[in-house]
Image (cartoon, rainbow, N blue to C red):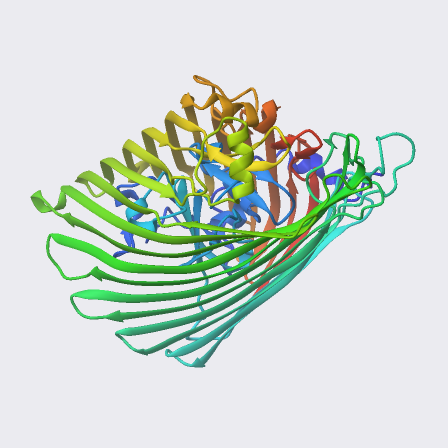
Amino acid sequence: MTTKPMLTSCASLLSLCFPAHAADTTATADPEPAAQTVYVTANKGQPQILVEAPMSVQAFSGKELAAKNVYKLDDLITAVPGASQSEQLGEFNRTYSIRGSGSGGGAGDAMLGYYVDDTPFVTPNLQIAPPLRLMDIQQVEVLRGPYGTLYGQGAMGGTMIFRTRNPSLKAVTGDAETYVANVKGSSGASYGAAAAVSIPLIEGKLGLRLSGGGDFRAGWADVYAGAPTGAPRATDANKMHKGDARAVLLWLPNEDLRVRLQYMHFGGKQDYTQEMASVSPAYFANYGAVDGYEKSSNDLYGVSVEYDLGFANLTSATGYTSFDLSNLSGLLAPIVGNGRLFNRFKGHSVTQELRLASTAAGPLHWVGGLYYNNAESDIGYDVDFEVPVINTIGSTNIGTRNTSVFGEVSYDLFGGKLVPLLGLRRYRDDRSFLGTTVTPAPSTTTGGAKPAVTTWRANLAYHPDRDMTVYFNAGTGFRGGIVQAPLQVAALRADGIIVDQALAPDRMKNLEVGIKGALRGSRLTYEFNAYRLLYTNIQSGLATSIGLSANATLGDATMKGLDFSLQWEPLKGLSLGLSGDRNWSTYDRVNPLVAQGIGAVVRDGGQLINTPKYTARVDIGYTTPLNAAWAFYSNASAARIASRLNQGGASTAEFNLFDGNIGLRGVRYETELYGQNLGDAHGPWSIRRPGFIAGPTPRTVGVRVRYHF
């Protein structure tokens, strides 16, 4: 492998600047003003001031993310207490966890809910997150823990809501940026560019926003046909390119009606994948002549209509998402020799939510609605070895048609100082399975299930003044049960694991107390939470004795934890941030036969897999005007992720991530020197099994230029 020194001479300068909170990226050379009021909409009712929202919720503006050098979701995850990346196949297929939700592994439906505005980014039996571009983000809201009455199936561990930018209805505006960078170990430059323009078609009534961009990341890992000895077959091979496009049309025909149409496309390809035989040094082994890859193509359509009825807001949110992910890997197995494994995940999802939220003055507040989802995913596979003993081609099709009715109601007591809330959601699903084997022997298997689940939430909030909220929250969440092939069921039963074709949904109950607020005189905001999670019917993937992958109910677990977040501006232009989580997780009861198929680390009293015992992050930012036209800014961050257990008995070591940037901001231009993973941590942060290890991108140093008009 080769290492090019481009830009690395600036790394020592960057490492002196510890990261970021409040660098403003608007067209001004002044420092960001004093702490501003932040609103969140996660309650699906009227927007709430963040410090008054009685829930474990964070809000990150697009400006704050830019200041913190956050450009991808795995950067953002380090700023969420108790969150981590639990699995990674490549650039596009990643699984994230909040508060122990990753203990179910990568099998089954998502355990975190992802929303792009009002459109769920979801499909059955696939756990992926939307790869949004920072330029399009207005705000990200992150709910920690289950809020099953509002977000339902698939949001058991938490929910991430990406609020995207609207068109301007007053003036033509735009943004553009470009960057060039060096990834340590790569033999070429990484680069990218993006732009957005907003056009008022009818002033004050109709506007259009168009945006898009592309990125290329150079590779740094070598490829060996067999063992990692001698000359590699390919060098710096895992290069990646991706692109995206987005269009938003906003129409305000009158003061009561709001119509918003949105289209997004994301796509790309990485040569080979991010799962390697080794991350330090970085290489792929036993690939034979296979040219591996990971590909992704996703589309999202959304239509949102809001109407003010006077006493309540009526919202209709319609969404359609399509997914197409595929990957090809080289393998070496005993007896059968070298081979290749191809997987393709293809699916679509149609969603419709109709809800009504009260707006009338008075102590009573409520929200209620109906939800419908019709989705399908098809997982194709092709296993091809030199000795065709276990070669097979087939597919698994999962379909779901589910409906929900939900509602929450609260009442202000003592002038709004004490607010009790109750909520319920009833979910019904009609889930189908179709398994098809083409070779070695053609066959078709079918099955299905019709589960019904009720979730609830109870909350009591106390507001002693406008700058403090103390609350107790109790609630439940779940995800749909996995439906699998009769062949998988037979293999499990042969191992003594008695299962039905459809597993019962796994569930989570959350008991939590929290306090949040702001000290205006000190320009300090804070949040502290103590929680206890009861996790039952954990669905998990495992390997049967005949080598066939299958799914079964593992058992139950308990997780207790403390998380916190502090933001402080001790001096004008200086911002400090500290956030983290400390938890104690144990399996209370596991089926030993299922545990045996997962790995020796899974046992009664053991730590949950894919769950680090702690996470922590520090941010420091500074900005000051140089003159009437320009301002200087610098930001730095340090994140630490504890070790955690992975499937198969492997353990990832704890590691640190250091990021930073330093730059000049003018009225229209910005230019900055930035660095990510400045300590060049290799992790790994994910080990599915030996030879399938993933870690952070090596140290990256670059220059970025932005233009605003």
The residue nearer to you, when weighing 116 against 59, is 116
Residue located farthest toward the left when viewing the structure as drawn: 414
Q: Quadrant of residue 2?
A: top right
Residue 220 drawn above or below residue 580 = below
Q: How many marks?
A: 0
Horizontal side of 109 relative to 425 (left or right) equals right
Q: Is residue 84 visible?
A: no
Point 26% across, 59% down: residue: 369
Point 18% across, 44% down: residue: 421
The residue nearer to you, when weighing 466 against 230, is 230
Q: Quadrant of residue 491?
A: top right
Residue 110 drawn above or below residue 334 = below
Horizontal side of 686 relative to 84 (left or right) equals right
Q: Is residue 174 visible?
A: yes
Q: Position of residue 706 (x, y in %)?
A: 61, 59
The residue nearer to you, when weighing 106 against 498, is 498
Q: Position of residue 510 (x, y in %)?
A: 31, 34
Residue 319 drawn above or below residue 71 = below
User: Which quarter shows the N terminus?
Assistant: top right
Residue located farthest toward the top when viewing the structure as drawn: 605
Q: Position of residue 385 (x, y in %)?
A: 78, 41
Q: Quadrant of residue 388?
A: top right
Horizontal side of 552 relative to 151 (left or right) equals right
User: Which quarter shows the C terminus?
Assistant: bottom right
Q: Position of residue 321 (x, y in %)?
A: 50, 62
Residue located farthest toward the right when viewing the structure as drawn: 230
Residue located farthest toward the bottom when viewing the structure as drawn: 202
